[in-house]
Amino acid sequence: MKIASALRGTDSLFGVVINGALVDLSALFASPQALVAEVHSEEGRARVQAMADSASAVELSELTLLPPVPLARRILCVGTNYADHIAESDRVNEAPPHPVIFTRFPSSLVGHGEHLERSRASTSYDYEGELAIIIGQSTRYASRENALAVIAGYACFMDGTMRDFQRHTSQFVPGKSFDRSGACGPWMVTADEIEDPYALTLTTRVDGNVVQQASTSLLIHDLQAIVEYCSTFTTLEPGDIIATGTPGGVGYVKDPPLWLEPGREVSVDVSGVGTLVNTVIDEPA
């Protein structure tokens, strides 16, 4: 099952993607978070499917897709979580003993097909393709044994970064939270459709050229460790998004650097999940 949010004109809607259309369930749930919580269980998915059978649908081509949960309460991101990204880094030289966590703001994310914006304050705009997990139930102090069970689903994530601002201090947040600099989508695929989250291939392309590719089996801190760690310092809630880290091949290490400039297309594909595609523009004056 695929869960998505979108705009039709100025109206917000969310629901289930079926046969290239969004079945609108927004009148039946208080929020996208409530829908995510419902589809977290097998019984809930059955109820949602029954609702979708009698609800109206809108072709995706008529909509502007938003992140699957447009106003997630928490957007947490894991840094330096693939060995090849550590090897290319000019900031770290070994795997961290605990997940490196930073946050993004909801305003920093757009949906599939929307424009990414290069800030007028920076020309070192970089790409990072990632697998994101979306939480399905309120969770505090998850154990390793039950951590996977709290994941409602998976999405593609583009952790766009203004590298100069990321390097101003040891804190990543400024470089990671410029408005409309990252993306998530095109939808959330429910966890029951992903047989093994460690058998997925993550591929990032810039203008159609592969610049990153890795298996999720190579995560240093795996999904269980990430959920366990994050749920220790905060209560994770339905709809919270956690981006799990990017592999090697980012733009700043290339010679010359491969920055995201206006007109460039960046795509993040995760096998079994989908493909997130966005085009870069300059921030409007």
Image (cartoon, grey):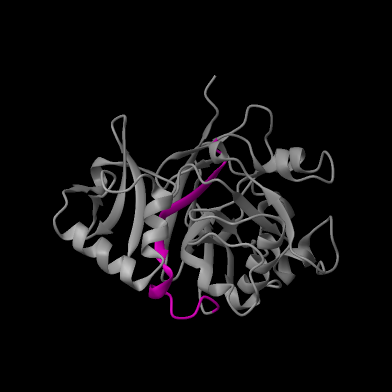
Q: Describe residue 269's horizontal placement relative to residue 54 as left or right.
A: right
| Front-most of residues 98 and 245 | 98
Q: Residue at x 74, y 71 (%)?
A: 83
Q: What residue appears at the point 67 percent right and 68 percent down from the top-left corner? A: 228
- Left or right of 262? Residue 14 is left
Residue at 36% across, 54% down = 35
Q: Can residue 139 be seen in this view?
A: yes
- Quadrant that contains the C terminus: top right
Extreme residue toward the left, this view? 54
In the displayed structure, would residue 262 be above or below residue 277? above
Residue 261: quadrant of the picture:
top right
**Where is the N terminus found, in terms of image quarters?**
bottom left
Is 11 a magenta residue? no
Q: Which residue is drawn at 68% across and 64% down?
A: 248
Residue situated furthest top in the rendering: 285
Q: x and y percent of residue 212 in the render?
A: 59, 63
Q: Give the range drawn in magenta.
A: 180-198
Residue 64 drawn above or below residue 209: above
In the rendering, at what x and y percent does residue 66 appear?
41, 43
Front residue of 30/274: it is: 30
Q: Relative to 129, is 189 on the left or the right?
A: left
Residue 108 versus residue 263: which sits nearer the camera?
Answer: 108
Q: Is residue 182 magenta?
A: yes
Horizontal side, residue 123 vs residue 107: left or right: right
Image location (x, y in percent) of residue 94 = 84, 68
Count of numbered marks: 0
Q: Could you tell me residue 204's position as x and y percent?
A: 54, 60
Q: Does residue 201 appear in the picture of this structure?
A: no
